């Protein structure tokens, strides 16, 4: 896929983790999860930016501010699509240390649609996450999102789950791929 821009979302406060999640060392041995993402994005020839400005990530590349700030991930997604202006964007969570290049390529190469995203795997048994979309491992069509996101933001509809319910098709994943979508939210998640 040619006209693609990836955004690695690093702007969260990491309150439960107690430190920036993207700077944790992944099991694969890279210095940080964000550096792992950057290496994979280079391997698939996808330019990238960091979404959210935090001083801890300054040395890792270009960063953009949420637009508007303070409304959660939808502000980051809005900033990313406005920065891209055309094509598609990949929204990638900085706390997913297990995604491999093959799954990233599957997301990039999925058939065209407004939004393409997998469904979440429950962390430990049935949870509230089971069956929910993975909005921060998703591909978004920029022309549609440039129109859609400001309208949603203006009316206070900030939930990405609702956006995906309205526009997404599922990226079908097998058990091995779903396991890669595990995120690290609190210290007990880190292995």
Image (cartoon, rainbow, N blue to C red):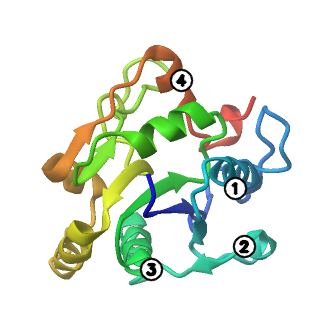
Give the left or right position of residue 187, taking residue 82 as reference. Answer: right
In the image: residue 76, left or right of residue 116: right
The residue that label 4 is drawn on is 179
State which tag comes first along the sequence, 3 or 1.
1
Please tell me how crowded label 2 is: few (under 14), some (14-19), or many (20+) other residues with Cα within 10 Å.
Answer: few
Q: In this view, which residue lies farthest toward the front?
A: 2
Q: Could you tell me how far apart the alpha carbons at marks 3 and 1 are, in whole angstroms?
A: 18 Å
Separation of disc 1 and disc 2 at Cα? 9 Å
Q: Which percent across, then down, holds residue 158?
A: 27, 67
**Mark 2 and mark 4: span between their CA atoms?**
28 Å
Q: Which mark is residue 161?
A: none
What residue is rendered at 59% in x and 70% in y? Answer: 49
Question: Pointer 3: residues within 10 angstroms few (<14), some, or many (20+)?
Answer: some
Write down the quadrant of residue 23 in the picture. Answer: bottom right
Mark 4 vs mark 3: which is more N-terminal? 3
Q: Nearer the viewer, residue 3 or 71?
A: 3
Contact check, label 3 and label 1, Cβ < 8 Å: no
Can you identify the residue that label 3 sits on?
83
Pointer 1 with pointer 2, Cβ within 8 A: yes
Are circles 4 and 3 on residues that touch, CB within 8 Å? no
Badge 4 crowding class, 10 Å Cα cut-off, few under 14, some 14 to 19, many 20 or more, is some
When the figure is inspected, residue 120 is found, relative to residue 59, above or below; the finding is above
Q: Mark 2 = which residue?
A: 61
- Point 32% across, 41% down: residue: 133
Q: Gap in Å between the C-alphas at discs 1 and 4?
A: 21 Å
Viewer-nearest of labels 1 and 4?
1
Quarter of the picture containing the C terminus is top right
Residue picked out by circle 1: 38
- In this rendering, the answer to whether 38 lies above or below 149 is above
The secondary structure type at the circle numbered 2 is loop
């Amino acid at each position: 896929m040619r006209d693609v821009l990836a955004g690695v979302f690093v702007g969260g406060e990491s309150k439960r983790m107690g430190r920036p999640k993207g700077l944790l060392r992944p099991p694969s041995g890279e210095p940080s999860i964000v550096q792992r993402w950057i290496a994979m994005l280079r391997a698939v020839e996808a330019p990238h930016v960091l979404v959210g400005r935090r001083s801890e990530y300054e040395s890792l590349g270009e960063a953009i501010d949420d637009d508007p700030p303070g409304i959660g991930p939808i502000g980051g997604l809005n900033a990313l699509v406005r920065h891209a202006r055309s094509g598609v964007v990949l929204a990638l969570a900085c706390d997913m240390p297990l995604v491999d290049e093959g799954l990233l390529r599957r997301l990039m190469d999925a058939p065209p649609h407004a939004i393409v995203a997998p469904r979440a795997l429950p962390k430990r048994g049935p949870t509230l996450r089971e069956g929910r979309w993975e909005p921060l491992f998703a591909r978004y069509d920029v022309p549609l999102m440039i129109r859609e996101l400001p309208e949603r933001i203006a009316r206070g509809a900030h939930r990405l789950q609702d956006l995906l319910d309205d526009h997404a098709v599922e990226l079908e994943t097998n058990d091995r791929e779903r396991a890669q979508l595990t995120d690290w939210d609190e210290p007990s998640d880190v292995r």
